Image (spheres, rainbow, N blue to C red):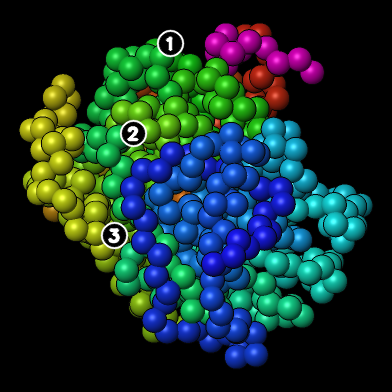
Amino acid sequence: MSEARSPLSASQPAASTETHATATASASPTSTDQSTRPAKRQDVDYIPFARKALKRFFGYDDFRAGQADVVNAIMNRHDVLAILPTGAGKSVCYQLPAMGLRFTLVITPLRALMRDQVQTLVERRNIPAALIDAGTGAAERRAIYDKALAGGLRLLYVAPERLGTRDFAAFAARMPIDLIAVDEAHCVLQWGQDFRPAYLNISAFVRSLRIRPVIAAFTATATPTTRDEISGNLGQYDPVRVGTTFDRPNIRFDTRTVGRWDREDEIVAWALTHKGQCGIVYCNSRKRTEELEQALLDAGVAAAHFHARMAEADKGPVQDRFLSGDIQVMCATTAFGMGVDKPDVRWVINDGAPDSIEEYYQEAGRAGRDGKESVSLLLWDDDDFAWMEQRIGESYDNDAMDDKAQSAARAAAFERLHAMERYCRTSGCLRAELLRYFGEEPDAGKCGKCSNCCGDGGHARTLASRTSNFGSKPRHGSGSGSRSRYGSDSSHGTYGSGSSRKRFRRASDYDDIDDGYGEVSSSDGWGSSDDAQDSRGRYGGGGRGHGRGRGRRGGWKRYGSGRGSGFGHDDDDFGDSAASGRSGKDLRTSPDSVYAAIFGVDKE
């Protein structure tokens, strides 16, 4: 066969090959208009050209597993569904083809990812790229559109809500789009835990274009039962499916049964034992991120918090300090870390069980992206699941869904939660449990690198308390008035005794959740609800807890000026870093704050 001319005139990177990837065509086409279907033809092997471009522009000698198959399918104008684990290098799969195409549109729910990738492309790779988000003014948007129309832009990053705006629709009608890369494609699953309604509009946007582009969808968490639905909802036609193993052999998976009120000591002890290593602690609420941050700061650990309701001015500096290594431990809700290229995270701790294996796997996968030995430690207790069951049962009271839809959504949420509970309770290999959930049969019954296989799982070695403290008064502090930290009032009896799951009041009484989807707007802001995955409270129901509990190391008066303990609104309803009573800017520029003592004082 004669050598084909490479379309990759200015290409892009990857890394060393790890495992064999599979690429298969979907058995059934989706509902895409027949007139837009590409004609059947013999594919060209673009991989040799892509590999040279990879070396030239990114300095990598070869692709990681799965990357070459995705790139080759895109360059042959096939739709693609790529199911690649966290850290597999999904961005390369669309950035590299973009170098040989006129224009690539990247749709992502994560502003942090936009910022990180555009900065890397422009400053380190000298590749013309831009992003449009809530902070992009009208004049700046027009300049970006004009640059793209003039051929001066290769990639443009937007949130899915942007597709429905008037000025973007006018731009898209004029701009020839060759490739649409859909990041976090599982957000299109209507009954999924990360459902984002604007994703359902992507297929209509594609149909509105004069020339149909290639649609490449990327996700790390699609199960075998959801893959057809993802492709169908995005309007893909006969997509090539590329997948690699879900196994992350360099990550050790550990679980420990630790009561809610003992976890703080466990996390602080872990951070001190692993001082010098970078880690992330994922929390179930915004307030919890700040509480753990303070506990770590008090213990002398360089820590910070990150959640959706932080002051916007704080988010960039906090992320930058984490990337640079100034911050050792980030206490965050689940949105943090998605799309952030921090390869040397050595450990990830979950302060309580997530509500799905998909969410847990994404969070755990943020450890060890450099391939070095890392740990995922899940601290859980019976009360985690009892609380989430209660919350799911009271949720999905949504006017946008009829009774049948609400019932289906609730059932799907319960199914995901019960799978997570089975993972926590299994006495078998944790790695095997994860792999089977994602439709992959493990090579062996035991991995030899999880807490169950090594015989040190289950109860924490130093804090093995199994007493239920859920809803009871904390030992090291008190809530507002007679209320506990979770909002239970002494007049309602004690909810912390016994093992019955009927000891709860309403799920809305317990802790503040980083609500995601009940507040989705078109702002596509970094710290708004549109971070899309900054939540355990994605079910749409429930209010915020009224308790204003104080942690054992000072709680919410972290920097010395806490608010009074009123009811009716939540700390994080305010624009400033309200839990401390001082703005984020004030904390960063004040010499008397703990923050400044560790990180120094920022200049005005």
Instruction: Choose between 438 and 90: the one closer to the eye.
Output: 90
Using the numbered discs, state the Cα–Cα distance from disc 3 to disc 2 in whole angstroms. Answer: 22 Å
Query: Where is residue 444 drawn, in percent x and y?
Result: 12, 48
Disc number for residue 349: 2
For the residues labelled 1 and 3, say whether their Cβ atoms are less than 8 Å apart. Answer: no
**Split into 4 quadrants, where in the image is the N terminus?**
bottom right
| Magenta-drawn segment | 594-604
Report the mark closest to the observer, 1 or 3.
Answer: 3
Q: Amino acid at mark 1?
A: Gly
Q: Earlier in the sequence, mark 1 or mark 3?
A: 1
Q: Quadrant of residue 422?
A: bottom left
Residue at 59% in and 44% down: 52
Q: Earlier in the sequence, mark 1 or mark 2?
A: 1
Instruction: Choose between 52 and 163: the one closer to the eye.
Output: 52
Disc 3 target residue: 438
For the residues labelled 1 and 2, say whether their Cβ atoms are less than 8 Å apart. Answer: no
For the residues labelled 3 and 2, say whether their Cβ atoms are less than 8 Å apart. Answer: no
**Split into 4 quadrants, where in the image is the C terminus?**
top right
Instruction: Choose between 144 and 55: the one closer to the eye.
Output: 55
* Magenta highlight on residue 454: no
Disc 1 target residue: 300
Query: Where is residue 525 drawn, in percent x and y?
Result: 67, 49
* Magenta highlight on residue 595: yes
Residue at 42% in and 84% down: 28
